[in-house]
Image: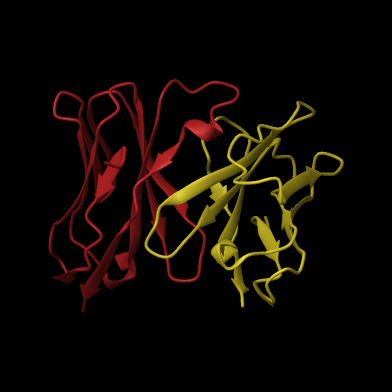
Amino acid sequence: QKEVEQDPGPLSVPEGAIVSLNCTYSNSAFQYFMWYRQYSRKGPELLMYTYSSGNKEDGRFTAQVDKSSKYISLFIRDSQPSDSATYLCAMSGLISSGSARQLTFGSGTQLTVLP
Amino acid sequence: GAGVSQSPSNKVTEKGKDVELRCDPISGHTALYWYRQSLGQGLEFLIYFQGNSAPDKSGLPSDRFSAERTGGSVSTLTIQRTQQEDSAVYLCASSLGRLVEYFGPGTRLTVL
């Protein structure tokens, strides 16, 4: 079993829909949770990060963490065609000076928003 | 300003050849990371440089892989005696803080 599971999709929605992207994980030591967006033939870009449980909102994006269920979500409101990309979740234990190797990524969900 | 740049964007090589991949991080970023992304897979950590500290090489899959960072800036990832399983997109990232923030566009390596 992978440490981080992410539904690969593809997910296709009409413009304006609310999108829910999810990851589950098995390592209870994870405390930092990130979402990256990756356009085709580009590198990932950090969208949002959250620490521990709770919600974080940034414009049309909301990141939600439920540590009791080991489940994280990214919600996109009023989705736009420009949101079409692959979304990767990533998570980490305590961030320390040598923390890079602790980032575990999901395999990504491919999202298409149809105009 | 300019983002993270990588070269070449595409590299096709024959099995057994050596390849060098280059990363130019964002100016002033002290942290530099190399990741590998295979088709349908998440990002796999390879190596991490932080300032003048010894690099964290714990993710390198074999001794055919090595990397260096000169002058705290440009980094080169070298793969010796390439194998077909080395085919992947190699991504470089840089940051000032502890989050892996800014990725380059990647080098797509194909080993025939």
Quarter of the image with the C terminus of chain A in it: bottom left
Q: Nearer the viewer, residue B92 or A46?
A: B92
Q: Position of residue B20 (x, y in %)?
A: 77, 61
Q: Quadrant of residue B33?
A: top right
Q: Position of residue A47 (x, y in %)?
A: 39, 47
- As displayed, is residue B15 above or below residue A72? below
Do we see residue A80 in this rendering?
Answer: yes
Q: Position of residue B90 (x, y in %)?
A: 59, 59
Q: Is residue A52 left or right of residue B99?
A: left
| Image point (64%, 41%), residue name | B47
Q: Nearer the viewer, residue A10 or A48?
A: A10
Do we see residue B106 in this rendering?
Answer: no
Q: Nearer the viewer, residue A56 or B18?
A: B18
Letter of the chain shown red in the rendering: A
Which residue is the extreme one toward the right?
Answer: B71
| Image point (76%, 69%), residue name | B17
- As displayed, is residue B105 above or below residue A58? below
Q: Position of residue B96 (x, y in %)?
A: 63, 35
Letter of the chain shown yellow in the rendering: B
Q: Quadrant of residue A32?
A: top left
